[in-house]
């Protein structure tokens, strides 16, 4: 069904559901469900499955009825006892409950004032709401997939998906409803407020027993989502992996660069970039195909350069894209990104590295720190100050790392690598032609770049996590039921992350502008993806340490960094709260 048809169905169901809800909780608890069903029947919203509706259509109605807390026993009447469909509709119900609870909490947080400000402006409240939004995003992705699977997959596979989806949706719904009560405060603990009704309904869905449900099966491979064209592309990739031989490493001790170049030569780096820039001009969803297959086969991920490449693609001049983009994608020239400073980490607007204009060039002085891969890089995309204090005075320069006055001091990480560095710029001359965008455009470019850097597909992270889970599955849990439960839990949340990634990449394709070289970026919703990625990375990192032992310490330490690089978890929550959920700024 097309998105506009689903939207129309959703709007219709929401309007009718609102009219069904009694004005007070006392009447809601004793409401006549049969009477409500009669109203829905007249509107053509019952017996939908029997009339040939897809599971996705029925799930939309179930979600809206739950969101408005309409007193309707809808799931059983539509599922016909089919276990996978029943579970999929339970998931829809749980998602609707969670969405309604979060909406209640957000309305309250925007209007309730304390200490002269709306409570949503306080970080403690804003971060609660942002975390609830992450829970809900994962649940929505999995619930949507479960409804799709009922009609698209074999019965056993659909049941495995729906059973796993119910676990994630139930966990998320209970967490969101509990968070809503915390945000609502005392009001959330009153009988007349819907908060306790929503929480009761979330727990009911969590405990719901469904006939025909067996122990959760193995989740079907997400390759089942491939379109025929994607399947053909994947087959091509699989054939290349099967024939791949690393050969001698001719990259002077830089195996990551050797892998980058091999992968690019085969056509699997920047597949969504225009052919003129060294890509293949494919939809963004093909990036997920590459990530998924590499992870499935235990191969290294795609080099994490997507954020830099997208910045050049979106903001570079024709000459800059022609000069730099193909070499970046191919690995012929290695790049790093100079953002953080000793006194300006999360607060990029406070950076002090200065670029003073001198005729047709800039003279750069300052220091950057935590610069990934600076030791091996040939160029740096440098955020620096060319004007007034604050974000309006920032610009972006392309700086050769071998320019006179550039010094790179490696920083040894906790796991004994040298991928970070402190970079010093002492009177470095940079031609004005190597400014990316206009003078003063640095902040806008940096925010767009960071949105890509936070995207699990754009930095190739999902394949690494999938490989870690596959390794743990192969190793086994030694009969330990606690470890087995934790592995199932981590795998379900990784599955939700991968579903979210695919949906977001497909949406990016749908929203492409007419100019293929100026495609829109992920937007602030990318911070939800980053927070979900961080959660899954930490789950897997800690589990692998407990399962494997000290040999997994490096991966565990890296998982702790997930909440720091690309903007800390706390910064991501601020972005979600203010720019996605519409809560007021703290200052």
Image (cartoon, rainbow, N blue to C red):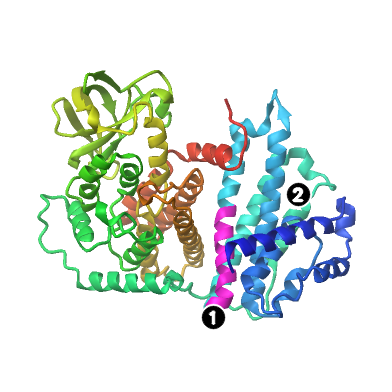
- In the picture provided, is 485 more to the left or to the right than 56? left
**Residue 169: horizontal and vertical position, in percent?**
61, 61
Q: Which residue is mark 2?
A: 195
In this view, 153 is above or below 586: below
> Looking at the rendering, in which quadrant would you find the N terminus?
bottom right
Residue 380 image point, x, y percent: 24, 36
Q: Position of residue 391 (x, y in %)?
A: 42, 26
Q: Is residue 215 visible?
A: no
Per the rendered image, the range of residues in magenta is 136-152
Q: Is residue 369 visible?
A: yes
Residue 12 left/right relative to 393: right
Disc 2 is placed on an element classified as helix
Q: Residue at x 66, y 67 (%)?
A: 59
Decide whether residue 349 is among the magenta residues: no
Magenta part, dominant SS: helix
Between residues 555 and 4, which one lies in front from this camera angle?
4
């Amino acid at each position: 069904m097309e998105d506009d048809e689903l939207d129309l169905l959703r709007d219709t169901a929401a309007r009718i559901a609102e009219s069904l809800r009694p004005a007070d909780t006392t009447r809601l608890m004793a409401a006549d469900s049969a009477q409500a069903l009669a109203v829905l029947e007249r509107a053509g919203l019952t017996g939908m499955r029997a009339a040939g509706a897809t599971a996705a259509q029925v799930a939309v109605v179930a979600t809206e009825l739950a969101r408005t807390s309409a007193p309707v026993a809808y799931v059983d009447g539509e599922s016909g006892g089919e276990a996978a469909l029943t579970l999929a509709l339970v998931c829809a119900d749980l998602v609707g409950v969670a969405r309604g609870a979060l909406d209640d909490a957000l309305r309250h947080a925007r209007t309730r004032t304390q200490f002269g400000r709306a409570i949503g402006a306080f970080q403690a409240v804003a971060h609660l709401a942002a975390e609830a939004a992450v829970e809900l995003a994962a649940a929505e992705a999995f619930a949507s997939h479960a409804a799709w699977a009922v009609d698209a997959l074999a019965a056993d596979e659909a049941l495995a998906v729906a059973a796993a989806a119910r676990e994630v949706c139930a966990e998320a719904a209970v967490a969101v409803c509990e968070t809503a009560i915390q945000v609502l405060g005392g009001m959330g603990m009153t009988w007349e407020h819907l908060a306790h009704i929503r929480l009761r309904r979330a727990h009911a869905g969590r405990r719901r027993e469904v006939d025909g449900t067996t122990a959760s099966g193995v989740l079907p491979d997400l390759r089942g989502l491939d379109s025929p064209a994607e399947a053909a592309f994947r087959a091509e990739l699989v054939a290349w992996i099967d024939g791949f031989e690393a050969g001698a490493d001719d990259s002077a001790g830089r195996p990551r660069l050797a892998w980058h170049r091999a992968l690019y030569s085969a056509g699997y780096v920047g597949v969504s970039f225009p052919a003129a820039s060294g890509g293949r001009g494919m939809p963004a969803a093909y990036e997920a195909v590459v990530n998924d297959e590499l992870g499935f086969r235990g191969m290294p991920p795609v080099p994490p350069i997507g954020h830099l490449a997208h910045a050049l693609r979106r903001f570079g001049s024709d000459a800059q894209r022609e000069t730099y983009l193909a070499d970046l994608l191919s690995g012929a020239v290695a790049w790093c990104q100079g953002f953080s400073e000793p006194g300006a980490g999360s607060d990029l607007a406070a950076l002090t590295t200065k670029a003073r204009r001198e005729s047709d060039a800039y003279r750069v002085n300052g220091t950057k720190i935590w610069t990934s891969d600076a030791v091996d890089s040939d160029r740096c995309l440098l955020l620096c100050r060319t004007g007034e204090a604050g974000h309006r005075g920032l610009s972006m320069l392309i700086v050769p790392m071998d320019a006179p006055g550039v010094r790179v001091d490696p920083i040894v990480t906790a796991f004994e690598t040298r991928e970070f560095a402190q970079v010093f710029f002492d009177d470095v001359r940079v031609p004005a032609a190597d400014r990316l965008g206009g003078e003063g455009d640095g902040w806008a470019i940096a925010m767009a770049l960071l949105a890509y850097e936070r995207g699990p597909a754009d930095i190739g992270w999902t394949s690494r996590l999938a490989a870690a889970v596959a390794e743990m599955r192969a190793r086994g849990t030694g009969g330990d039921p606690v470890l087995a439960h934790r592995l199932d839990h981590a795998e379900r949340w990784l599955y939700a992350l991968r579903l979210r990634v695919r949906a977001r990449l497909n949406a990016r394709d749908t929203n492409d502008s007419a100019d293929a070289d100026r495609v829109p970026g992920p937007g602030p919703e990318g911070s939800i993806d980053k927070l979900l990625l961080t959660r899954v990375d930490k789950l897997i990192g800690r589990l692998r340490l407990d399962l494997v032992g000290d040999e997994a310490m490096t991966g565990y330490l890296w998982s702790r960094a997930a909440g720091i690089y690309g903007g800390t978890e706390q910064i991501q929550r601020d972005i979600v709260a203010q720019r996605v959920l519409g809560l007021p700024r703290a200052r």
